[in-house]
Image (cartoon, rainbow, N blue to C red):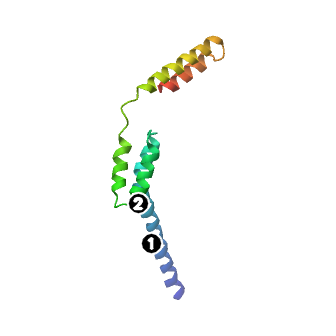
Amino acid sequence: MFYYEYYELLELFDLIGLWFFVVLVFILLVALLPTIIAVRKNHPYKIPIILINIFGGLLWGVGWVIALVWCFILPRDRSNGSINVANEIQIMHELMEKGVLTQDEFELKKRALLKV
């Protein structure tokens, strides 16, 4: 009789422990959502977003809100990126003409740069 009650008590603790773990993981995912988004989007300011999310989130969640908004805002001045891509393609084309790269390698790298 005692063993049966003890076993039920252990099952209850296991169930409570499982729910505690699930809730804890959910809270951590929500708390680190700005960090996850910034890293996945390869945001240019991901390090400051991570720091604001972690340290600013301790201040009544104000830092979390700031980091969440900031992770969705990308800087407008992205013109240097297209110039760099064009230069990179030109350099690869010259390498292809010299015989360093094959036509297939050139096309593969060009598609990767253009993200086609």
Earlier sequence position, callout 2 versus callout 1:
1
Identify the amino acid type marked 2.
Answer: Ile
The residue singled out by tag 1 in the image is: 16
Q: Which mark is residue 27?
A: 2
**Whole-percent x, y for residue 8 in the image:** 48, 79
**Whole-percent x, y for residue 112 in the image:** 52, 26
Query: How many marks are shown on the rendered structure?
Result: 2
**Whole-percent x, y for residue 32 in the image:** 43, 53
**Whole-percent x, y for residue 34 in the image:** 40, 49
Residue drawn at the location 41% of the way across and 60% of the way down: 27
**Between marks 2 and 1, how big is the CA–CA gap?**
16 Å
Q: Is residue 64 above or below residue 72?
A: below
Residue drawn at the location 46% of the way across and 42% of the way down: 40
Residue drawn at the location 48% of the way across and 24% of the way down: 114
Report which quarter residue 101 is drawn in.
Answer: top right
- Identify the element where label 1 is drawn: helix
- The reply, left or right, for residue 56 in relation to residue 109 is left
Q: Is residue 6 above or below residue 113?
A: below
- The reply, left or right, for residue 109 in relation to residue 100 is left
